[in-house]
Amino acid sequence: MANEPSDEAGEANGGADSPERPPPSLFSTGLWGMDGPPEQVFGRNDWGSCSEGDTHDDHCLCVSPIREPVSIPPPEMILSREEMQELASGYRPVDMNDKWLAFMENDRLFLHRSWTGHGIYEVRFAAKGFSWTDETGFMPTSARVETDPRRYSREEFDPIRERDFLRDLIVHVSGEPMPISLPVFAASGPTVEAVLGDITAEEVDAIVNPANTRLSYGGGVSGAIHKAAGPELLAHCKTLDGCPVGRAKVTPGFWLDARWVIHTVTPQWRGGSRGEPVLLESCYRESLARADQVEAQSIAFPALAIGAHSYPLKEAARIAANMVRSTPTDVKFIRFVCFDNRILQAFQSALGQEG
């Protein structure tokens, strides 16, 4: 089968008779450095391999490749180096309710069912450097899924649902505690609207602060939020060790009507070819994930990235509307709070909302 993984990547280390290890790939060097991965990384050989019809026992977990692969859109997400290292170290199911195991070979992630060992998803990653943050993020560039119903049953095949579930699964095996078994898709999403107003006065469970990477007192909307929340907000932020671009962290709201403030760091617009769309999409996903973490039922967003970070308004509004409607969340009500009519009209248009 084309694109099948090489067995060389899983060879054991060491031993006088072992062949000389090949030099690390650029991806491996970017992830682990020149010294390579630590010894505790699990690979294909640690799980074993088996033929069709083989069964498991208590001492050997066998894995087998995808038999009928179909390409699907890769999840639109950014993983930090720490999350990618966690993913590349291999994932063991934590209990009988956790039905997945994972391992990596070079730049490719393999996700298998833990009981049968059947390969279900394969994902290629690429390292992306962001010069304005001196950080490296890791993004999926291609993905495929098993379609043989004897190995992975589903009511119907939907590439977009497969993509969304794959994203949640990657989040899970890279460190999130919530076990994931089979895809569950909500019948309807949250109510979404755009209004003209002051986000600091919103009576919602959480508001979103367009923060800087230090989570320090800033200007514009961020400065207004800090001023309204009181000095306790800045003091709390100083304990969080900053926040990377595209990610989000949550704090109490202190003097605000909102119980929580979700701080997300938006990308600087540099023409759109340096990962800006993916990072801005990640800001919305991460913010909703943090809202779910604190069980917020309502959330207010400003127009992220359009101010000092110069993101084109129409494109920023399109991304915002698409992401809050496509991201799985328990939030019931989402409001975009716009500070002038030009921004309001752009967001209402993106939402299909009458002015």
Image: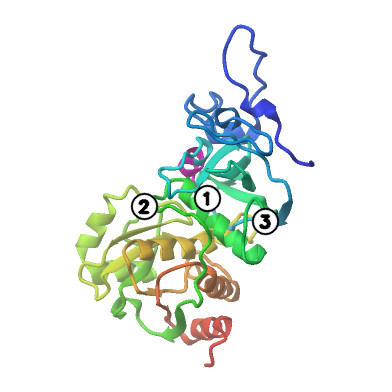
- Helix, strand or loop under label 2: loop
Q: Residue at label 2?
A: 214
How dense is the environment of label 2, judged by Cα within 10 Å: few (below 14), some, or many (20 and up)?
Answer: some
Question: Who's the residue at 54% across and 75% down the image?
Answer: 321
Q: Residue at label 3?
A: 149
Q: Residue at label 1?
A: 170
Across and down, in percent, residue 233 comes to 24, 61
How dense is the environment of label 3, judged by Cα within 10 Å: few (below 14), some, or many (20 and up)?
Answer: few
- Helix, strand or loop under label 3: loop
Residue 130 appears in the figure: no
Q: Which sits in the foreground, 343 or 104?
A: 104
Residue 203 in the image: above or below residue 53 = below
Q: Is residue 50 left or right of residue 180?
A: right
**In the image, residue 80 lies in the stretch drawn in magenta:** yes
Instruction: Give the mark, 1 or 2, whose residue is nearer the N terminus.
Output: 1
- Helix, strand or loop under label 1: helix
Residue 335 in the image: above or below residue 134 = below
Across and down, in percent, residue 276 comes to 58, 59
Q: Is residue 86 left or right of residue 294?
A: right
Q: Which amino acid does label 2 sit on?
A: Arg
Mark 1–mark 2 contact, CB under 8 Å? no
Q: What residue type is labelled 3?
A: Pro
